[in-house]
Amino acid sequence: MRRFRVTGPCIPEKHYMVNISGKLDKIVELVNDEAYFTINRARQYGKTTTLHELKKGLQGTISVQA
């Protein structure tokens, strides 16, 4: 049963979350181009979750289109 999470990173299998695959695709493209990027948002906008999912994508454990 999925729940809303208000602290810490979201785990897609356990928590409701917005689809961030488009955002991850853009970040991976920047990484592949060796470009700088920032993740700068207010509290609870998914910064930590985005970085965790990016790490998994760059390690090849999720499918991120590059």
Image: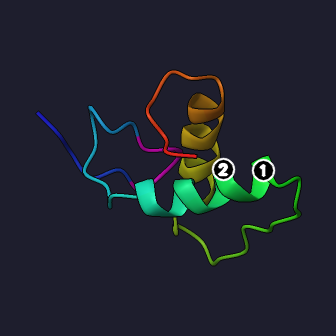
Q: Residues within 10 Å of mark 2 (few under 14, many from 20)?
A: many
> Magenta span has 9?
yes
Q: Which residues are magenta?
A: 6-10
Q: Residue furthest bottom?
A: 42
Residue 12 position, x and y percent, is 32, 39
Residue 3 position, x and y percent, is 21, 45
Distance (Cα) linking label 1 and label 2: 5 Å
Magenta stretch, main secondary structure, is loop
Residue 53 position, x and y percent, is 54, 40
Q: Which residue is mark 2?
A: 28
Compared with residue 61, is residue 64 higher up or lower down, i.e. above or below? below
Q: Secondary structure at mark 2?
A: helix
Q: Residues within 10 Å of mark 1 (few under 14, many from 20)?
A: some
> Magenta span has 58?
no
Q: For residue 43, which numbered disc appears in the image?
A: none
Label pair 1/2, CB-CB below 8 angstroms: yes
**Residue ID at (57%, 29%):** 56
Res. 29 image quadrant: bottom right
**Residue ID at (44%, 33%):** 63
Q: The disc labelled 1 sits on which kind of residue? A: Val
Q: Nearer the viewer, residue 37 or 35?
A: 35
Residue 61 position, x and y percent, is 50, 21
Q: Secondary structure at mark 1?
A: helix
64 lies left or right of 6: right
Q: Nearer the viewer, residue 28 or 45?
A: 28
Q: The disc labelled 2 sits on which kind of residue? A: Val
Q: Which residue is mark 1?
A: 31
**Residue ID at (56%, 34%):** 57
Q: Residue furthest left?
A: 1
